[in-house]
Amino acid sequence: MRALLSTWKTGVRSLKFWRVASLWVICLFYLLFQGGKTSLMLFTMVSLLVCYWLLSSLGGIRHIKGSRTMLSLEGEQFMLRAGDQAQIKLQLQLPRLLPLPYIIVREVMKRHNGDSWAFEDSVVPQVRGEAKLVYNTPPLERGQYEFESTECTSEDIFGLMEHKGNFQASGQFRVLPRTIFIPHWQLYSRNSRLPGPETAISNSRRETTQINGVRDYVYGDRISRIHWNATAKTGTWKSKEFEHESLPKTVLVLDAHKISYAAPQQFELAVSICASLLEYGSRERISMGLCTLGKDLRRFAPAEGYIERQHMIHHLVDIDADGYGSHRDRLEEMHDFYPAGSFFIFISPLADESAMRVLRWAKTKQMTPYQIQVGAAAQREGSRSSWQSALQNQGIRGVYVSSLQGLPASMGGGLA
C-alpha cells in the first residue's frame, strides 16, 4: 500500500496542466452521466484541487523574490581574506495568496577559475509570506566569487505537485590573498651590503629637516623635537614629525608562468608573498610597482598612493598561473617600464638558467636584482643552497621562502 501511494504521488507530480485538466473533465462527465451527491462532491473536490494547483503554479513560488546580504564573520565590514568565511543572509518574499508548507533553497557559488560550491537548505515561510535563511560559506580561497540564480522548490500542502521558482540577487564579492606582517626587510637597511660589485645604496629612512606634522610624544624623543606650541595648545606633550628621505623605487615582478610551478599551492604562496610586500611598502611609504608575467602582461607603475596600491592588490585577487614563453623576452616587451636605479624583485620558484637570465637582464637595465625563490616543503636543502651560492657569485641577493609564516624571517636576512 505504501509503495502504491508513493508511485501514485510520483505520477501526479509529473502531470502537466493539461493532464490535470483532463482529470477534471473526466470528473465532470462522471457527474453528468451518474449524477448524485457523491458525484457532485467528488467533482467539487477535484475542482478545488485543480484550482489550487493552477493558482500555486501560476501565482505561487514562481513569483518569489529575494535579496541577499553578505557579512564577514568578524565584523560588519565585508572584507575577506583567503581562509575567511562569509555569512550569507537571504530574505525571501512570497505571494501571500497561497500557503506553502516549506521551501527548498538551492544556490551555486562560482569562483573565477571555474570551481563551484553548492548549498541546499529548507526554510518554513511565515504567515506574511516572508522567510529568512542564514548560512556560512566554507573557508574561501583567493578569488572573485559570484552567485548564480537562486532556485526555490516547494510542494503543495498535499505533497502532490512540485513547483519551482527562480530569482537573481546580486552576490559578487572578492577574497583578497593571504598576507603576513613583515616587520623588517633587510634590503632597505642602511647596513645591508650585497657581495661583489652590486652594493645596496644607503637606504635607511633618515629624516630631513622639513617638518611634516605633529605627533604624540614618544619616550626618548630629544628636547629639540618637542613642538612647544602644540604642547601648550593641547596640554599634552607633542613632538615634531619630519619628512623622510625617499628610497629608490621598487618593482615586484611576479612569475605567473604555468610551467614554473609544481603545484597550485606554490603559486598561491607566490601571490601571498607579493601581496605581503605590497602591504609592507604601503606601511613604510615605499614607492612600489608591480608587473605580472601571466598570459596577459600587466604592469602598475611604482607609486606610494593608497588607490594605486589597492589596484595592485585587487589585480592579485583573480590572477592565474597561465603565462608562457621566455621570461626575459616578455620582460623585454616592456623594457621602458622599469626605471633605472630601482630594485627589481623577482618572485619565482625558478632556480635555473632562465631565472639567471632574468636577473642579469635587470642588471643591464641598471637595476638592483633581488630574487625571492618560492620553494616547496619537499625541496631538498642541497638544491636551494647551491642556487643561493650561484646568486652570490653573481653579486645578486636572494632569499628562499617555503611558507608564508617563514617570510618575515627570510626578509630579515638569511635563509628561512
Image (cartoon, helix red, strand yellow):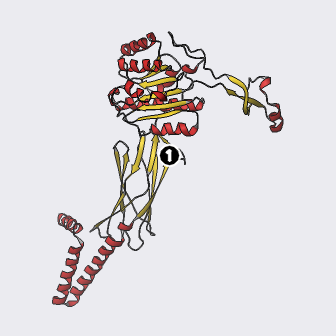
Residue 9 shown left or right of residue 219 in the figure: left
Q: Residue at x 31, y 71 (%)?
A: 57
Residue in the picture at 46% in, 34% down: 299
> Which residue shows up at 46% across the image and 49% down it?
87
Q: Where is residue 167 in the image (x, y as percent from the top left)?
A: 38, 61
Camera-side residue: 5 or 416? 416
The residue at the point 40 percent across, 13 percent down is 385
Give how far across and how far down residue 414 sits, in percent. Answer: 49, 16
Which residue does the numbered mark 1 point to in the structure image? Answer: 73
Q: Is mark 1 on a helix, strand or loop?
A: loop
**Relative height, residue 79 to residue 130 (above, below):** above
Confirm whether residue 246 shows in the render. yes
Circle 1 crowding by C-alpha within 10 Å: few under 14, some 14–19, many from 20: some
Q: In which quarter of the image is residue 215?
A: top right
Q: Determine whether 373 is above or below 298 in the image.
A: above
Please tell me how many numbered marks the rendered image carries.
1
Where, by quadrant of the figure, is residue 132 drawn?
bottom left
- 358 relative to 386, above or below: below
User: Relative to the observer, which residue lies in front, 80 or 396?
Assistant: 396
Residue 133 placement (x, y as % from top left)? 43, 57
Tag 1: amino acid: Leu
Residue 85 visible within the image: no
Quadrant of image for the N terminus = bottom left
Q: Position of residue 402 (x, y in %)?
A: 42, 24
Outermost residue, left direction? 33
